[in-house]
Image (spheres, rainbow, N blue to C red):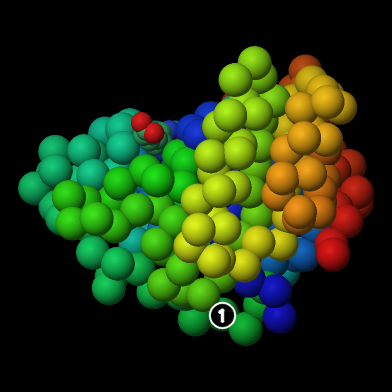
Amino acid sequence: MRKLFVTAIGTDSGKTLASAILTQNLQADYWKPIQAGTPRDTDRVRTLVDNAQTQFWPEAYFLQMPASPHKAAANEDIIISLDNIQLPDTQNDLVVEGAGGLLVPLNRNGDFVIDIAARLRLPIVLVCNLYLGSINHSLLSINELKRRNLPVLGLIFNGEPDPQSEDIILKHAGWPCLLRILPEPEITPEVVAHYAAQVQWP
Ligand SMILES: Nc1ncnc2c1ncn2[C@@H]1O[C@H](COP(=O)(O)OP(=O)(O)OP(=O)(O)O)[C@@H](O)[C@H]1O
Ligand SMILES: C[C@H](N)[C@H](N)CCCCCC(=O)O
Ligand SMILES: [Mg+2]
């Protein structure tokens, strides 16, 4: 059974798109444990995957403010606790989507998004979107994953291909590229199905 955690080098990097693709590839369940702001990523993925198997699990925290979870939670007088973030009770494969990048804070106690993956013992998929500046953000994220000794399944590149950026990121990561997602004029279930057929698991 495959359960995995999708994180990224930052927010708006394409985690929800990548998660929809992986969910469709595995016919997995999908879970976004912390949602800050609307529209809900869960609703977005629901519109993009097309199979009879996938179930959608409710967020552990659904916060109104589109902000860092520590800030969105404080806005509602909530303190996010990792103890309240427990894996859904499913026998199916499961794709878990983080919020923002690895070191987005959950609270002021030193818990970060990446601690969800660590606590739940989920192997990680890192989405690296491609833009000027993304090499640095990617390598910082990779360094942090290595420093924490977390299991990483591989990377997903999202955006206009940049072979030299991708090459240097993969060289330092030492993890495989699972998929390359190109800029798409529209994100549809057909686009998601197209990429779902291209995922290369290690
Ligand atoms: N390859 C692509 N082609 C076209 N649009 C894309 C592509 N990748 C992402 N987008 C668009 O960019 C926006 C941000 O992507 P997405 O919502 O997947 O980011 P995210 O990493 O999930 O952000 P968050 O941290 O809020 O969860 C969305 O509107 C999405 O449809
Ligand atoms: C609201 C947004 N779409 C995400 N859910 C949360 C992004 C937090 C980013 C925090 C930061 O890195 O500064
Ligand atoms: Mg998302």
The image shows residue 55 at horizontal and vertical percentages of 60, 66
Crowd rating for badge 1 (residues with CA inside 10 Å; few <14, some 14–19, many 20+): few
Q: Which residue is drawn at 53% across and 39% down?
A: 140
Tell whether 163 sits left or right of 85.
Answer: right
Vertical position of residue 3 compared to residue 193: above or below: below
The one nearer the camera, 20 or 144, is: 144
Q: Mark 1 points at which residue?
A: 90
> Residue 3: x percent and y percent?
63, 71
Q: Quadrant of ligand 2?
A: top left
Indicate the position of residue 181 as horizontal and vertical percent values. Answer: 80, 34
In the displayed structure image, the side of residue 36 where residue 186 appears, left or right: right
| Relative to 124, 174 lies left or right | right
From what the image shows, is residue 163 above or below residue 170? above
Q: Residue at x 62, y 26 (%)?
A: 134
Residue at 54% of width from left, 66% of height from top?
149
Query: In this rendering, does residue 57 appear at all?
Result: no
Evaluate whether residue 103 shows in this view. yes
Residue furthest out toward the left? 77
Secondary structure under badge 1?
loop
Q: Determine which quarter of the picture holds residue 44.
A: top right
Where the N terminus falls, by quadrant? Answer: bottom right
Residue 5 placement: quadrant: bottom right
- Quarter the C terminus occupies: bottom right
The percent position of residue 2, horizontal first and vertical second, equals: 70, 74
Tally of numbered discs: 1
In the image, is residue 112 above or below residue 156? below
Quarter of the view holding residue 14 = top right
Mark 1 Cβ inside 8 Å of ligand 3: no
Q: Which residue is drawn at 17% across and 50% down?
A: 108
Check disc 1 and give the amino acid type.
Thr
